[in-house]
Amino acid sequence: MKPNHAILKNSVLLLLILLLGGHHHLFAQQQQQQPPFWNEIAEFRKKDSVQHPPSGAILFVGSSSFRKWTSVHADFPGFTIINRGFGGSTLPDVIRYAGEIIYPYHPKQIVIYCGDNDLAGSKVSAKKVYKRFVKLYDLIRKHLQNVDIVYVSIKPSPSREKLMPLMEETNDLIRDFTATHSHVVFVDVYHLMLTPQGRPMDDLFVGDKLHMNDKGYRIWQRALLPYLDK
């Protein structure tokens, strides 16, 4: 009995559809299982594979306030800077990717801006954010020992004005910690960005009232410059 070629052809097509569909579903699952900001970290790794940044540079790491500081190299002439700000990252995100975007660079100094999104993205206390910072500090100390660390205070932005009491409490806790530990300093940009009435300065921010414009970054540049290692 001769095989029915039409039935055979349809069966093969059905099998291919099922296989391809299963593969697509598996790929979609894998994509969903990737942790937050995975693609941005992968892009950093891709750039590093083409040209790895030099050891002994100053590493800026943290959330989008650093990611959007596109003029950071021009703002600090004479300094070798690696900018690894990413997404709307939190301290746990920076901790998660420390093996990809901190340790491999062997920097002489690490400048951190993070904690802003921790307070905004989930109901966490100032003490919780402080503990997250201490965890990151301890990990850096373990892997890079006496590298100098600069923590930039959480900034007061108009869109998060309701969080200012928590911001101040978090900043105070981290400032107190840095005062009693070596090779780490706290840079206060918070108070530099307030009006005489104690409110965030609107003219330092772009339209979303969260991210800064050039005027805001000039304040950060002046505040940070005395603390950067030559």
Image (cartoon, helix red, strand yellow):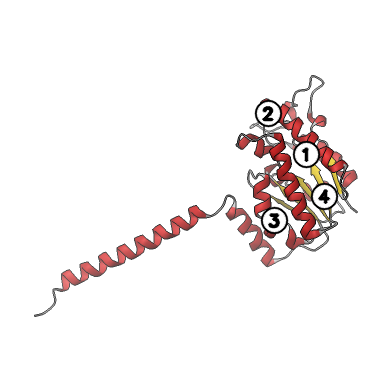
Residue 23, x across and y down, in percent: 39, 63
Residue 165, x across and y down, in percent: 72, 27
Q: How crowded is mark 1: few (under 14 residues within 10 Å), some or many (20 or more)?
A: many
How far apart, in angstroms, are the residues tagged by discs 4 and 2?
26 Å
Which residue, given by chain and number where applicable, does mark 3 sit on?
98
Q: Residues within 10 Å of mark 4 (few under 14, many from 20)?
A: many
How far apart, in angstroms, are the residues tagged by discs 1 and 4?
20 Å
Which residue, given by chain and number where applicable, does mark 2 sit on?
163
**What is the number of the mark on residue 217?**
1
Nearer the viewer's eye, disc 2 or disc 1? 2
Mark earlier in primary sequence (2, 3): 3
Q: Residues within 10 Å of mark 2 (few under 14, many from 20)?
A: some
Which residue, given by chain and number where applicable, does mark 4 sit on?
149
Q: What residue sits 21% from the left and 70% below the top?
A: 9
How far apart, in angstroms, are the residues tagged by discs 2 and 1?
21 Å
Mark earlier in primary sequence (4, 2): 4
Q: Is residue 42 visible?
A: yes
The total number of labels drawn is: 4
Q: Is mark 2 on a helix, strand or loop?
A: helix
Q: Which residue lies furthest to the left in this view?
A: 1
**Amino acid identity at mark 3:** Ala
Q: What element carries label 3?
A: helix
How far apart, in angstroms, are the residues tagged by discs 1 and 3?
25 Å
Q: What residue sits 19% from the left and 72% below the top?
A: 8
Q: How crowded is mark 3: few (under 14 residues within 10 Å), some or many (20 or more)?
A: some
**Amino acid identity at mark 1:** Tyr
